[in-house]
Amino acid sequence: MVMRRLSNCIGRDGALRIISQPTRSQAANRELAVERFMDLMREALRQVPIRRKTRVSRAAKEQRLEEKRHRSLLKLQRARKVPGEN
């Protein structure tokens, strides 16, 4: 599971490579790299909640269809009017 989630950070040789260069100090960069590694591992080990399928309620479906009918009628009314004739 961890290997799959970190696949974009793992090289061909199978080594996880983390680069950190925001400071001039090697020790500070190493500490930042270790923190970044710990964050990556925490994120990779986190359980993703399983998505449950839901259904659209009957009322919501009817409301959507009614709105589509209303829009359709408006567009039909616009199309029937000929510009310049009153």
Image: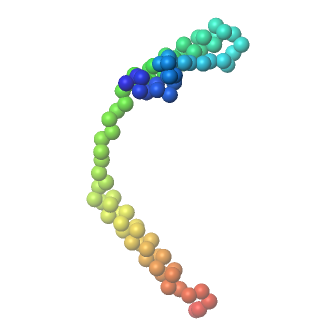
- Identify the residue at image location x=60%, y=11%: 30
State the quadrant of the C terminus.
bottom right
Viewer-nearest residue: 78 or 51? 51
- 74 versus 18 height, above or below: below
Viewer-nearest residue: 25 or 65? 25
Image quadrant assignment for residue 60: bottom left
- Identify the residue at image location x=59%, y=11%: 31
The outermost residue toward the bottom is: 86
Q: Position of residue 73 (x, y in %)?
A: 43, 77
Q: Position of residue 75 (x, y in %)?
A: 48, 76
For this view, does 35 lie left or right of residue 46? Answer: right
Q: Position of residue 43 (x, y in %)?
A: 45, 24
Viewer-nearest residue: 62 or 49? 49
**Residue 10 in sight from this viewpoint:** yes
- 5 versus 72 height, above or below: above
**Residue 39 in sight from this viewpoint:** no
The outermost residue toward the front is: 13
